[in-house]
Amino acid sequence: MRPADTLIARLSGVKVTGKGRWMAKCPAHEDGSPSLSIREMDDGRLLIYDFGGCGSLEVLGALGLSLTDLFAERLTHCAPPLRSSRTRPTPDTPPAANQTAPARPQSHLDKASPASP
Ligand SMILES: [Zn+2]
């Protein structure tokens, strides 16, 4: 279920005004005619704007939702798989750094020095 569906299902007086755009009655104040604008962005986020002056937190609070409900679905589904696959290859690189350490040129210099008159 998309965040838009969750939100729209809880609102009344919903009208589709375009692709990914709705108008609905604001649940946070006595709304005679729909003054709450909802817009779904390309990445799945929801933007809500109340022409009656209510903040998005007030609107969501009246519906029993929080800001995370506006974009929770996309974020939670995408983030974990990307992070786990990128952290696994890194443990292979540290052993390569150890191979450069055991180089001791100083002992050779000491034995070559006694070549004098
Ligand atoms: Zn309002």
Image (cartoon, grey):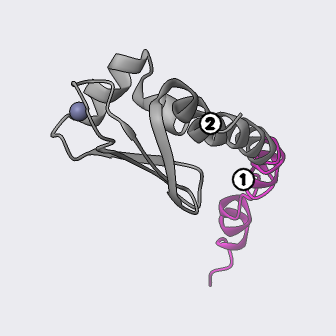
Q: Is residue 28 above or below residue 93?
A: above
Residue on which the image places disc 2: 5
User: Would you say 107 lies left or right of 25 here?
Assistant: right
Taking the magenta stretch, the answer to whether it contains residue 101 is: yes
Seen as rendered, the residue at the extreme bottom is 117
Q: Secondary structure at mark 1?
A: loop
Residues drawn in magenta = 88-117
- Reply yes or no: does residue 64 show up in magenta: no
Q: Is residue 89 above or below residue 100?
A: above
Q: In this orientation, which residue lies closer to the viewer: 116 or 5?
A: 5
Q: Answer left or right for 68 relative to 25.
A: right
Question: Where ligand 1 lies, by quadrant?
Answer: top left
Question: Residue 19 at what x, y percent from top left?
Answer: 58, 63
Q: Is residue 10 above or below residue 81?
A: above
Kindly state the secondary structure of the residue where label 2 is placed: helix
Q: Nearer the viewer, mark 2 or mark 1?
A: 2
Residue 32 x %, y %: 26, 33
- Left or right of 53 in this view: 108: right
Name the residue rendered at 81%, 46% in the picture: 95
Q: To which residue does mark 1 refer? A: 101
Q: Position of residue 80 (x, y in %)?
A: 71, 35
Give neighbour class at mark 1: few <14, some 14-19, many 20+ (Cα, 10 Å): few
Looking at the rendered structure, the number of numbered marks drawn on it comes to 2
Q: Residues within 10 Å of mark 2 (few under 14, many from 20)?
A: few
Q: Residue furthest front?
A: 32
Depth check: give the residue in front, 48 or 24.
Answer: 24
Q: At 47% across and 29% down in the image, what residue appears?
A: 11
Q: Are marks 2 and 1 in contact (CB under 8 Å)?
A: no
Q: Earlier in the sequence, mark 2 or mark 1?
A: 2
Mark 1: which amino acid? Ala
Look at the image and tell me in which quarter the C terminus lies: bottom right
